[in-house]
Amino acid sequence: MKSFKVHPCGSYPFLSLNENLFIKQCRVDTYTASGPGGQKRNRTYSAVRITHCETGLSVIAEESRSQAENKLKALRRLKKAIALNIRKDPTHSVFKLHESIRYLFHKNSSLRINKKNLLYPLFCATILDSIYIAGGKIGDASKILNISIGRLKKILGRDKDLLVSANQMRQHFRLKPLRIS
């Protein structure tokens, strides 16, 4: 069973930072990538590994021959990794929706957000924090978010990684995994 880390403030302080401030909290390593791409790929330091110093989470990006593109991809992956793996400690604060995504949880909202949207990791973290605070119970999490159970299940069903994290959390609370198709 994969474990998640609990942070007093959760992942929000990290995910709400713009990329320039966020990268200052990270260690960036570059290296040569192996594999297809020709001689240029094997001679340049285009592959990137970014480690978030406070959480210890690390990701890599090496599919592009451009170091700048790989760095951007790695930053986005790292934010999503933080969203999926860092939970808010319910004993330190009351659950509150972050201002920048509050509009997504209004009753008339479609609750659809593109995975490429910079706010998507924050959206995922909010969903998972509500499930964690609810002890893995989807019904209680939907009440915390002020949405229906069906809408919450649709959100989880749209992102495989989000569903896997939710099910790992439910397993932590000794609940059966969700079966969403």
Image: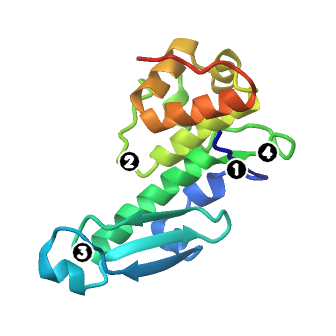
Front residue of 34 and 24: 34
Nearest-to-viewer mark from 4 and 3:
3
Three-letter amino acid code at the position of disc 3: Ser
Mark 4 closeness class: few <14, some 14–19, many ≥20 residues within 10 Å: some
Observer able to see residue 107: no
Nearest-to-viewer mark from 4 and 2:
4
Which quadrant would the C terminus be assigned to in this image? top left
Mark 1 closeness class: few <14, some 14–19, many ≥20 residues within 10 Å: many
* Spatial separation of the CA atoms under disc 4 and disc 3: 38 Å
Nearest-to-viewer mark from 1 and 2:
1
* Residue holding disc 3: 66
Q: Secondary structure at mark 3?
A: loop
* Spatial separation of the CA atoms under disc 1 and disc 2: 20 Å
* Residue holding disc 2: 117
Residues under numbered marks 4 and 1 in contact, where contact means CB atoms less than 8 Å apart: yes
* Residue holding disc 1: 10
